[in-house]
Image (tube, rainbow, N blue to C red):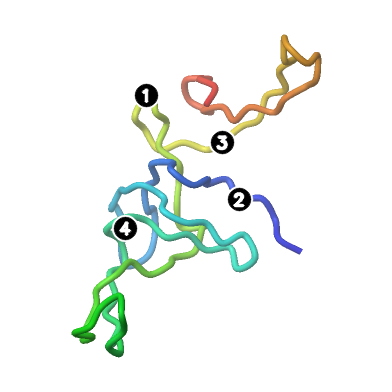
Amino acid sequence: MAQNLHVHKNDTALVVSGEFRKKQGKVLKVFPDTQRVIIENVNIIKRATKPSQKSPQGGVVQKEGSIRASNVMVVCPKCSKPTRIGHTHVKDATSNKKKTMRTCKLCKEMF
């Protein structure tokens, strides 16, 4: 069973450990089953592709590879610092239901 990750699609994330340490980029895709994420311009790999209708030439294509989600921290949109994520329960005004919001542990900003 897949777990929810602290990183979501379209978040800005900073790689904190491993080969790509100190690189920052936008999260393009999240794989909760395998605990991996794909970040823009991080872990660029080369793949040989056969000719197809989409790319009639074929050849070598460069694309982003996945890295472990545990090696990544979310960058807060307000304070622009890498931070841990907290959760706050907020009552929704329209439907009177509780909604869980992600919060920055440094500046307490909800996003």
Element class at badge 1: loop
Would you call the spot at circle 4 few (<14 residues within 10 Å), some (14-19), or many (20 or more)?
few
Q: At label 1, which amino acid type do we have? A: Cys
- Residue at screen point 39% across, 53% down: 16
Position in image of residue 90 (x %, y %): 71, 18
Q: Position of residue 49 (x, y in %)?
A: 30, 86
Mark 2 touches mark 4? (CB < 8 Å): no
Residue to which mark 1 is pinned: 79
Where does label 2 land, which residue? 5
Q: Residues within 10 Å of mark 3 (few under 14, many from 20)?
A: many
Mark earlier in primary sequence (1, 2)? 2
Depth check, mark 1 against mark 2: the one in front is: 2
CB under 8 Å between discs 3 and 4: no
Report the Cα–Cα distance between label 1 and label 3. Answer: 13 Å
Q: CA distance from mark 3 to mark 4?
A: 20 Å
Dot 2 or dot 4: first in sequence order is: 2
Q: Are marks 1 and 3 in contact (CB under 8 Å)?
A: no
The residue shown at (33%, 66%) is 64
Which mark, by number, is residue 6?
none
Disc nearest the viewer among 3 and 2: 2
Mark 1 crowd level (few <14, some 14–19, many ≥20, 10 Å Cα): few
Mark identifier at residue 85: 3
- Say which amino acid is labelled 4: Arg
> Considering the numbered disc 3 on the image, is that residue within a helix, a strand or a loop?
strand
Q: Considering only vertical position in the picture, is 12 above or below 54?
A: above
The kind of residue on which mark 2 rests is: Leu
Nearer-N-terminus badge (1/3): 1
Q: Which residue is disc 4 drawn over?
A: 21
The quarter holding residue 91 reads: top right
